[in-house]
């Protein structure tokens, strides 16, 4: 049994990629605004390792505003097919421009154009307005590469706490909790 939370994450994530029918990289992202009001939504994990867990978004969105105001977040992976969850809590920093550029280049062209067309988290009069913006971006970038919009990029959650939850019979679940210390990680077992 590993005592390295990142090795354990890699193992569970590899299993989830084989068993989950859709979006094994989907995770709930919880943030809090300046008034302490929590908010949660689903995002997609796009990179991970000992330095943290990375996702990308419009930096003018509600979630980005909350992350800029209160740079802490919680993540939750729930893999129903495996009857497992992983909870992660930690500080948030921006991914570098180079990281954001590199990931943006891997997105489909339509997803790249959508990043330019979207005013994420802000209302529009109707869907037709959004579709017209998308058409404008298609015309603007026709025949060329689509650069990353300056308002779009990544965030990294650097974990201070990682909890691995495994469903067990009779609700006698198993929870392994790793807490970051100055010397590395400490581990504890929790039960329901």
Image: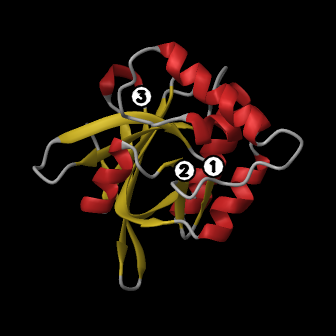
Colouring mode (rainbow / by chain / secondary structure / one colour): secondary structure
Residue 117 sits in quarter: top right
Label pair 2/3, CB-CB below 8 angstroms: no
Q: Earlier in the sequence, mark 1 or mark 3?
A: 1
Give the SS element for disc 1.
loop
**Is 34 above or below relative to 127?**
below
- Residue highlighted by disc 2: 55
Q: Measure the alpha-carbon separation of dots 2 and 3.
A: 31 Å
Q: Residue furthest bottom?
A: 183
- Residue highlighted by disc 3: 168
Q: State the residue at coordinates (36%, 45%).
A: 63
In the image: residue 149, left or right of residue 158? right
Q: Which mark is residue 46?
A: 1
Q: State the residue at coordinates (41%, 49%).
A: 60
Q: State the residue at coordinates (86%, 47%).
A: 144
**Is 129 above or below relative to 109?**
above
Q: Residue furthest left?
A: 35
The percent coordinates of residue 48 (x first, y second) are 60, 58
Label pair 2/1, CB-CB below 8 angstroms: yes
In the image: residue 89, left or right of residue 117? left
Q: Measure the alpha-carbon separation of dots 2 and 1.
A: 5 Å
Q: Nearer the viewer, mark 1 or mark 3?
A: 1
Q: Earlier in the sequence, mark 2 or mark 1?
A: 1
Would residue 170 be seen by someone viewing this image from the given angle?
yes
Q: Mark 1 Cα within 10 Å, few/some/many (few <14, many 20+)?
A: few
The percent coordinates of residue 51 (x first, y second) are 54, 70
Give the SS element for disc 2.
strand
The percent coordinates of residue 97 (x first, y second) are 61, 68
Q: State the residue at coordinates (40%, 85%).
A: 183
The percent coordinates of residue 191 (x first, y second) are 28, 42
């Amino acid at each position: 049994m590993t005592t390295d939370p990142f090795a354990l994450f890699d193992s569970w994530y590899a299993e989830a990629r084989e068993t989950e029918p859709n979006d094994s990289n989907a995770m709930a992202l919880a943030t809090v605004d300046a008034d302490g009001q929590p908010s949660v939504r689903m995002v997609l994990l796009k990179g991970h390792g000992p330095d943290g867990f990375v996702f990308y978004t419009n930096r003018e969105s509600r979630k980005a505003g909350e992350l800029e105001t209160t740079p802490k977040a919680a993540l939750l992976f729930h893999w129903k097919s495996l009857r497992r969850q992983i909870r992660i809590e930690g500080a948030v920093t921006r991914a570098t421009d180079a990281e954001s550029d590199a990931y943006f280049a891997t997105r489909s062209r339509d997803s790249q154009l959508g990043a330019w067309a979207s005013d994420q988290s802000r209302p529009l009069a109707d869907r037709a307005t959004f579709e017209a913006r998308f058409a404008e971006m298609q015309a603007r970038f026709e025949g060329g590469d689509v650069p990353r919009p300056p308002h779009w990029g990544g965030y990294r959650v650097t974990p201070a706490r990682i909890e691995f939850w495994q469903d067990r019979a009779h609700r006698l679940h198993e929870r392994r909790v790793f807490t970051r210390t100055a010397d590395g990680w400490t581990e504890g077992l929790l039960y329901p």
